[in-house]
Structure formats: C-alpha cells, structure tokens
Amino acid sequence: EATAAFIAGMPKAELHVHLEGTLEPVQRLEFAERNGVALPQDDVAVYTDLTSFLASYYPNMTVLQTERDFFDLAFAYLTKAAGQNVRHTEMFFDPQAHTSRGIAFATVIAGYHEAVVRAERELDISAQLIMCILRDHSAESAMDTLAESLHYKHWIVGIGLDSDERDNPPSKFARVFARAREEGYLLTMHCDVDQPNSIEHIRQAIEDIGVDRIDHGTNILEDPRLVALARDRGIGLTSCPLSNAVVSDGGKAPEIVELLRAGVKITVNSDDPPYFGGYVTDNLLALAAVTDLSRDELVLLQRNAFEISWISSVDRDAHL
Ligand code: HPA
Ligand code: ZN
C-alpha cells in the first residue's frame, strides 16, 4: 500500500552487500554449466546462524571462475539495485575466497571493476568496491591480500573484515588495518549480531582500530558509553534486518529503531540478498512492518546512508 510505494520510491544508498552473496540460484546453475563445474550442493541449504550460512556461501563460489562471471554477478546486482532506486552502493568482495582456490586477484577485480564502470554509464547508479579480509584466515594472508590490493588501489575505496567471527577478534588484524589506513583506505569491520564477545569486538573496532563504520554492530546497545562514542564520532552502523532475522532469534528491528532514535547513523542494507530473502527495499519493508517507523524516519535512514557513505563529498552533495 502507501508505505510500500513510499519505500520503493525513496532514493537509496546501500552500504552493506557482499557481491559473492548476491549469487542467485539461477546464476549458480548458469555459471556451473558454462564453466563445466559440478554444482557444489543442493539448491535449498538450511542455515540458522553465521556458521551454517558460511558453510553454503563458500562452496557456492566455486561456480565463479572467469572475469566474465565476476562481471555478470556484479552487473546483475547493480541492475537490481538500480531498479530499487539505489543511487549509490558500496559493495564488499572477498578476494581470498577466490585466490585460495587458484583464481587470480586480477581476474576477480577486473570483472567487478568493469561492472562498476558500465553501471555508472548505463544504469544511473554510482558504485564502489570495499575489499573484505576473511577473519578466519591468518593475519599473514590478510597482509598479503592487502599488499596485492595496492596494485588496484584506485578501484577500491576501503577495507572491511568478514567471515567467521568466533575467536577472530578485530585485534587479530590490528597491523593489517593500521597499514590499510596508512595507504589511505577507509575502514570498516563486521561485528555480527549476537556473537561471543560481541561488545568487546565493537570496542576494539572503535577504540583500538579506529574504524569509520561498523557492519551490523547493533549489540553496541549493551554499552551506553560506546553508543555515545559512535554517535559523537559519527561512526555509522550498517544493519541488515532480514539477515539478522535468520541468524538471530527475533531479529534486531527494535534495536535498529532504538539506535536511530538515539542519533546513531544507522542504515538498512541487504547483506546477502538471495540467502536472506531480499534486496534493500525488501529489508526496509520488513523493518517497517514490525516497527512504528515514521516516513521521516524512513527518510532519515537514507540520509544517514548517504552521509556515512564513502562517495566523494562532491558527488555526495549532489545526492543529498
Ligand atoms: N557476516 C560475516 N561474513 C559474511 C557476511 C556477514 O554478514 N556476509 C558474507 N560474509
Ligand atoms: Zn555482511
């Protein structure tokens, strides 16, 4: 009805979407066939937490082999995003998930970058790439990946941290992120919902690493001091309601609203759309359905997203 049309029509920015997590079942089939690789697993995998999600996510990537595959994957996502009135998007990618199985870094980034260029030309959407470090790999592998990324620095806006958080705190990558900062990258880290030591990981990300944003991070409400710090420093939180609802009992909708009303720059995003049940508009609809968010607050979520985005300030002012 009216709210749905309002949400669909809002100009949006998306800041938390994993390109490898946009792989739709039909693309998985198509890429497997054209590359002559066996389908990694059954269509319908069941997952109820981060670990079981990742146990589907990585095997599915074996269908991604060529530069064309990476281009097609990213361009298909950008087409869907543009169709939902997303005007700017910052997309994570996981190079180690490909280099560790023999696909060259250059193959991955060339395909993704070409999709960014063509989308800006053909789809009226601006896009940037954020390289994620896999936190369940070693700090040495992370440093090697950072070094390799420097050849493509002009194509990458920032560095993130994702994958299995258990026993892989931000502090494990303190040197890697310090180096990334020296190289001029902006910094973000996943602090997934309801992880063991969640609040300590959030504290490390903010106070020890000095991140610009946190991905998920709604458990910050456990420490009012950190909430105030995030608000005062303008550290954004990129939340993902449908993903939260899969990996956390009850989801995080009340927490998202509370943080928004506390003045924290929180935003709504899709994470891994086919895995969690929808793109950014679907996430906003799901959140609106279970909360009393006003239209002004729905707009504020988008204003926050453009404000904490890493679009250049010149471009950003044109969107605001
Ligand atoms: N958390 C951690 N790792 C991930 C995610 C996530 O939300 N999506 C893809 N890899
Ligand atoms: Zn994520």
Image (cartoon, rainbow, N blue to C red):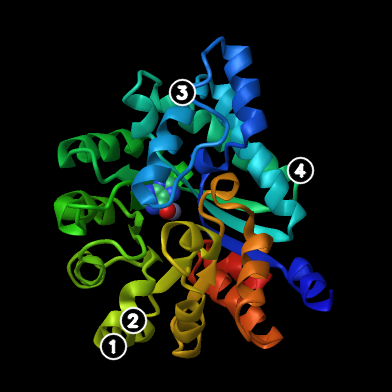
> Which residue is label 1 attached to?
224
Alpha-carbon span between mark 4 and mark 2: 41 Å
**Pointer 1 with pointer 2, Cβ within 8 A:** yes
Q: Is residue 33 above or below residue 164?
A: above
- The image quadrant of residue 28 is top right
Q: Amino acid at mark 3?
A: Thr
- The image quadrant of residue 268 is bottom right
Q: Nearer the viewer, residue 160 or 39?
A: 39
**How many residues crowd mark 2 within 10 Å: few (<14), some (14–19), many (20+)?**
some
For residue 62, which numbered disc appears in the image?
Answer: 3
**Pointer 1 with pointer 3, Cβ within 8 A:** no
Instruction: Report helix, strand or loop for mark 1.
Output: helix
Alpha-carbon span between mark 4 and mark 1: 45 Å
Alpha-carbon span between mark 2 and mark 3: 38 Å
> Which residue is label 2 attached to?
221
Q: Amino acid at mark 1?
A: Pro
**N-term-proximal mark, 3 vs 4:** 3
**N-term-proximal mark, 4 vs 2:** 4
Q: Position of residue 275 (x, y in %)?
A: 54, 46
**N-term-proximal mark, 1 vs 3:** 3
**N-term-proximal mark, 2 vs 3:** 3
Instruction: Report helix, strand or loop for mark 2.
Output: helix
In front: label 4 or label 1: 1
Alpha-carbon span between mark 3 and mark 4: 29 Å
Alpha-carbon span between mark 1 and mark 2: 6 Å
